[in-house]
Amino acid sequence: MLAFIIRRFAQALFVVVAMVVIVFFGTNVVGDPVWMMVPGDATQEQVEEVRRAFGFDQPVYVQFFRFLADIAQGDFGRSYVHGGSAIRLILDRMPATLELAVVALIFAVIIGLPLGLFAGLKPDHPASRAIMAGSILGFSLPTFWVGLMLIMFFAVMLGWLPATGRGPVTTFLGIETSLHTLKGWQHIALPALNLALLKISLVIRLARSGTREASLQDYVKFARAKGLSPRRIVGVHILKNIMIPIVTVLGLEFGSLVAFSVVTETIFAWPGMGKLLLESIQRLDRPLVVAYVMVVVLLFVTINLIVDILYSALDPRVRLAGKSE
Amino acid sequence: MTQPVLEVENLATHFFTRDGVVKAVDGVSFKVGAGEVLGIVGESGSGKSVTGFSIMGLIDPPGRVVSGSIRLAGEEIVARDDEAMRKVRGKHLAMIFQDPMMTLNPVLRIDTQMIEAVLAHDKVSEQAARERCIEALSMVGIPSPAERLVAYPHQFSGGMRQRVAIATALLHRPKLIIADEPTTALDVTIQSQILAEVQKLCAETGTAMVWITHDLSVVAGLADRIAVMYAGRIVEEGNVSQVLDVPRHPYTRGLIGSVPSANPLGARLKQIPGSTPSLGRLPKGCSFEPRCASASEACRAAKPDATDYPDGSRVACFNPYSLARAS
């Protein structure tokens, strides 16, 4: 197990280095950040001054190695735009994004799982066909469009839910959250639903195929022969079997929820790090972009690790294989 | 005569598929007395498993019991609703399946799977249920049952898993156990161990049993009576010695004749010509007629009804072998 974890970290390190190289040269190609920093009427001397102050007058490879050396010491630099420490800015915004991703994940499970179970147990029922058709829409409709439609429908036409922003925030157990008030939930409902839509469809499909497969197994027939209630057969025998693929996939998808919250956060003006990233790219704020990428890479690696550990908790056969290694 | 545990009369189970109606079981009748073991023998697709599942009420669509009656200790169970049938399953009627690797849920511990079977029918504490499970496991010969109870199915061998399944079936001391080829997936030594174990348990608890198999040698040592099935019907039924020693139906004769030990060493095995008919398109007459050596005009015209013989056998054939011809 330990060797496995070490191997995982080595792989992650390689990914991190590759990402640094790509992001550095990528942002370098996009444009000259100096023009973003100086006022429009700045003189040539002032521009050169700023350029020297940030080291942009050096050749690209020199800039790169200086940048690398800083990162190795844990210094991601200061944001060109905001002035503060880049990593600090990202971490400040992280709780809002994580909150959104977690609520979206919960939506995906509590909406997707029952629908998928139903569609799997009664594949010929008209409602099941409707669920499956709906899941195809969930897969294929673009997130930004669905987001706009949600705003138009629930916020503009019905006026039930606020269109943008986040509810009042407090600190609970050291974590910033807006989920302690009804207002917070009203604010998060639409963006979380928007972000969850794709995952709901995914959970429906996984749950349906898993249920259909499991309900044909002999152990389900044996459970029926024991005289168990249908409730117990579905709720224990089938559910525990289909949870294995669902937990795996959802775990891996959690990283992409965080990463792809960029679109949702922008549409719903959710003050998370995805929105910050988009602004930083527009302003060529390289330290912020790099810091964001590092955070997301680390998040992915951690999540994958947690999924592997969770997986062995769900499937006893994996546990045994791990021990004998 | 005491009341039989199970009476099946004219049972017909059909599957309504896209290609037409498949008559998997078509007019089957038999009785099983208390403590008696009935062996149902037949080829794959002869309807023996479907008969077992029909008794359990576990036929899934597109299949359906279309007619006939199944009485358990005198009570009709065919037309019962799901909930009423659920109360019978596991309590009075238990079943053991063919493949022990598949019958236990791989992600649940043995204790979870056995205790839930106890609690499905009896309102007892979990501790009491656990003790009953331990008792049942030791009854089927599982060493240190209390420890093994908290293990997962993959930590058991195939034979041990089948013992767990048998212990689960015995938890409520059912009146009848249906065993659907429970030893087919096991190797020969384990098979004989399980057979001896089951025979002993049935004798001790007075449980009647329907043992479904395609292996004549298994039923020869185990069963009191044998029913031979062909294409959804019972062609011959009688005491073990009667059916195996002096078979009357040409199909039974063919089956017994094809057993390797009945043939001279080194010679080609005798076989029944042709193959089993498709259950969707059975001939109007006797289903076995196209493969039968003693078929006559009458066999092509109609299906033979079962005739009772004074020795207790029932044979469905127009031209049965007489005792004189058989010997």
Image (tube, coloured by chain):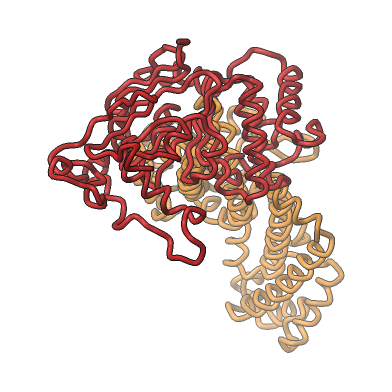
Chain colours: A orange, B red
In percent of width and height, residue B48 lies at 40, 38
- Position of residue A200 relative to residue B142, above or below, is below
Q: Residue at x 31, y 25 (%)?
A: B308
Say if residue A246 shows up in the picture. yes
- Position of residue A36 relative to residue A198, above or below, is below
In the image, is B274 to the left or to the right of A161? left
- Taking the view exactly as shown, the residue that stands out farthest to the right is A73
Locate the C terminus of chain B and report the quarter of the image it occupies: top left
Say if residue A190 shows up in the picture. no
In percent of width and height, residue A213 lies at 48, 46
From the viewer's side, name the closer residue of B136 and A104.
Answer: B136
Q: Residue at x 48, y 60 (%)?
A: B264
Locate the N terminus of chain B and report the quarter of the image it occupies: top left
In the image, is B13 to the left or to the right of A219? left
Q: Residue at x 49, y 44 (%)?
A: B216
From the viewer's side, name the closer residue of B260 and B150.
Answer: B260
- Position of residue A254 relative to residue B316, above or below, is below
- Position of residue A224 relative to residue B18, above or below, is above
Quarter residue A178 falls in: top right
Count the numbered circles shown. Answer: 0
In percent of width and height, residue B100 lies at 60, 43
From the viewer's side, name the closer residue of B292 and A154.
Answer: B292
In percent of width and height, residue B128 lies at 74, 17
